[in-house]
Image (cartoon, rainbow, N blue to C red):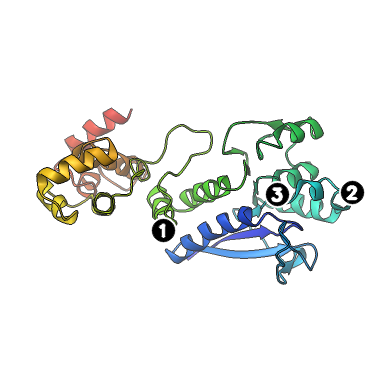
């Protein structure tokens, strides 16, 4: 199986959550079977986090090999360090970043990691973002950069930047959805108990994570079952049994917890599945109907019209 390398650049005075959040997302994706290889590198030894937690030895920059389509993640670090003369003098680091970019590596920053990309000149003429406390500073120091505020993450070419801390998790889940698919990213988010995945500057969310802002285990269990078994024919009675409720009580509780009926939720899941399958040129409408638990191609066409 082809693998995609995810490399984290460990900067001095790194913000631990910027690293750990995204790192955990990719680890869980790997555990679920994604062809991901995770690695770490730094340009000096004896690195510690912003809270002075020491980090053990990691690979040097020249020990890392990339191919086009791999990812380099730059978690944020203390801004005072990133703007220090000491860091600005690391020209070999900035040349290394530009070399990776020229090789087709997808560069990603979390929080103030955007300052490292800006110092390398890689954000000139591009849209980007960073932590809300630092957007004005980033724009002032780098006038050729187009800083966008009030978004979680933004993509411009093969460079992605995110706002900071937990938005690094959102960015990592977005990358997983690109490497695999939306349902795979949903499963990773569910493993991390993240039911409100946020989609950068977009208002819409994947249906696999909508209607999940509740803590009712029985309803979650039914939602999980529907998303994993939408190809199967089922009845309201079957779903009520999965939730360990009577049919009448299940219908009432499902609407109360999610805000929509179970039938409407099932239809939304089918639409999402159709959106994914219709992109596959080798799938006929008949096959799509079967994969979505629909009776005929006519039902597929009707839902497709609703999507347009």
Q: In the displayed structure, would residue 40 be above or below residue 155?
A: below
Q: Position of residue 298 (x, y in %)?
A: 17, 35
Provide residue 304's location: percent of width, then percent of height.
Answer: 28, 33
Q: CA distance from mark 1 to mark 2?
A: 42 Å
Residue indicated by mark 3: 101
Relative to 142, residue 37 above or below: below
First along the sequence among labels 3 and 1: 3
Element type at mark 2 = helix
Residue identified by numbered label 1: 191
Q: What's the residue at 80%, 47% (across, down)? A: 80
**Residue 164 appears in the figure:** yes
Per the image, the residue denoted by label 2 is 85
Question: How many labels sit on residues?
Answer: 3
Which residue is more in the foreground, 268 or 244?
Answer: 244
Whether 58 is drawn above or below 73: the answer is below
Residue 233 visible in rendering:
no
Dot 1 falls on a residue whose secondary structure is: helix
């Amino acid at each position: 199986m082809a693998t995609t390398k995810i490399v984290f650049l460990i900067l001095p005075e790194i913000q631990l959550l910027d690293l750990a959040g995204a790192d955990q997302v990719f680890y869980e994706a790997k555990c679920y079977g994604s062809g991901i290889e995770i690695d770490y590198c730094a340009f000096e030894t004896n690195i510690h986090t912003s809270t002075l937690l020491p980090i053990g030895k990691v690979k040097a920059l020249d020990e890392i090999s990339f191919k086009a389509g791999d990812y380099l993640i730059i978690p944020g670090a203390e801004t005072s360090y990133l703007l220090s003369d000491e860091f600005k003098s690391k020209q070999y680091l900035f040349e290394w970043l530009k070399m990776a970019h020229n090789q087709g590596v997808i560069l990603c920053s979390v929080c103030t990691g955007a300052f490292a990309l800006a110092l390398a000149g890689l954000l000139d003429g591009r849209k980007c973002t960073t932590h809300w406390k630092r957007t004005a500073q980033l724009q002032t120091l780098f006038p050729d950069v187009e800083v966008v505020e009030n978004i979680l993450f933004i993509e411009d070419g093969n460079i992605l930047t995110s706002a900071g801390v937990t938005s690094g998790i959102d960015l990592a889940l977005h990358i997983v959805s690109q490497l695999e698919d939306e349902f795979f990213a949903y499963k990773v988010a569910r493993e991390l108990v993240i039911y409100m995945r946020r989609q950068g500057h977009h208002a819409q969310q994947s249906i696999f994570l909508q209607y999940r802002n509740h803590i009712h285990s029985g309803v979650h269990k039914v939602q999980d079952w529907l998303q994993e078994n939408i190809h199967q024919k089922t009845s309201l009675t079957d779903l009520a049994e999965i939730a360990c409720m009577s049919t009448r009580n299940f219908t009432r509780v499902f609407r109360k917890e999610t805000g929509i009926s179970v039938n409407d939720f099932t239809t939304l899941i089918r639409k999402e599945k159709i959106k994914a399958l219709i992109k596959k040129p080798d799938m006929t409408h008949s096959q799509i109907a079967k994969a979505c638990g629909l009776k005929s191609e006519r039902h597929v066409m009707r839902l497709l019209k609703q999507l347009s």
